[in-house]
Image (cartoon, rainbow, N blue to C red):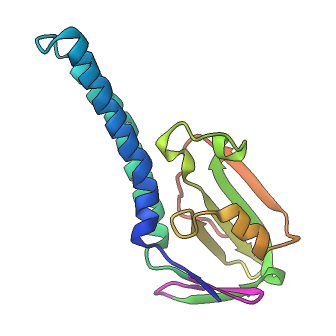
Amino acid sequence: MAEYKITFLSHFRYAFKISIDIILLFIGYSYFLYKNGPDTDYSTLRFFIMAFLLEFVPTVSLHLNYYSFNKKTRIESVFDSLIVNNLSHTIRFGKEDISEIVHYMSFPSRNKKIPFLPWDQYSHCIIKLKNGEQVILTSLLIYDLIPFMKKFADGIPITIEAGFYRWISKPVLD
């Protein structure tokens, strides 16, 4: 039996990439000041601040969006079924109960390339059940969603949809 939930390590994995970007921007600005002297105009500082904000704000908003969908969710993998326990209700289903799996990811993730933007590593999966319910699993909850879903739902086709910025909106039940 394996149990999945959002932990500090989940947040740290995603914060690590944005931390590296912050350090690289700081090193870039420091190098610019070293080469051009401290009494240069502030347009360069504005450029580095804007570059930071253009990476940081979308990444944090996407992280909070994913966190809001799975913050109180626990998943238990028991033999050939999943138990998705949210505070409001519990759903237990096996692969015979699944009608469709749609995995939403970025273009670099779909093509197995190195993520370029900090939000490229975020992905989510919507499992549509035959009884009409939908379960949303995010990469904050299960870091490697594709191998997990291939292992659990062996034989069920997984539709992969790629996009630039994979925001989760409230799902509409079919």
Q: In this rendering, does residue 174 appear at all? A: no
Q: Residue, x 46% and y 65% (percent of image)?
A: 10
Whole-percent x and y of residue 59?
42, 47
The quadrant in which residue 78 appears is bottom right
The quadrant in which residue 37 appears is top left
Q: Residue, x 65% and y 74% (percent of image)?
A: 134
Q: Residue, x 59% and y 69% (percent of image)?
A: 137
In the displayed structure image, the side of residue 144 where residue 72 appears, left or right: left
**Frontmost residue, 121 versus 71:** 121
Whole-percent x and y of residue 3?
57, 83
Does 62 appear above or below 26? below
Verify whether residue 109 appears in magenta: no
Whole-percent x and y of residue 52?
33, 34
Does 35 appear above or below 160? above
Which residue in the rendered view is the most extreme toward the left?
39
**Frontmost residue, 156 versus 128:** 156
Quadrant occupied by the N terminus = bottom right
Does 109 appear above or below 10? above
**Frontmost residue, 130 versus 136:** 136
Verify whether residue 85 appears in magenta: yes
In the displayed structure image, the side of residue 102 where residue 56 appears, left or right: left
Quadrant occupied by the C terminus = bottom right
Q: Residue, x 73% and y 69% (percent of image)?
A: 149
Q: In this rendering, does residue 165 appear at all? A: yes
In the displayed structure image, the side of residue 171 where residue 46 appears, left or right: left
Which residues are the magenta region?
Answer: 75-88
Label the magenta part by its dominant secondary structure. Answer: strand
The number of callouts visible is: 0
In the displayed structure image, the side of residue 77 where residue 85 appears, left or right: left
Whole-percent x and y of residue 147?
72, 65
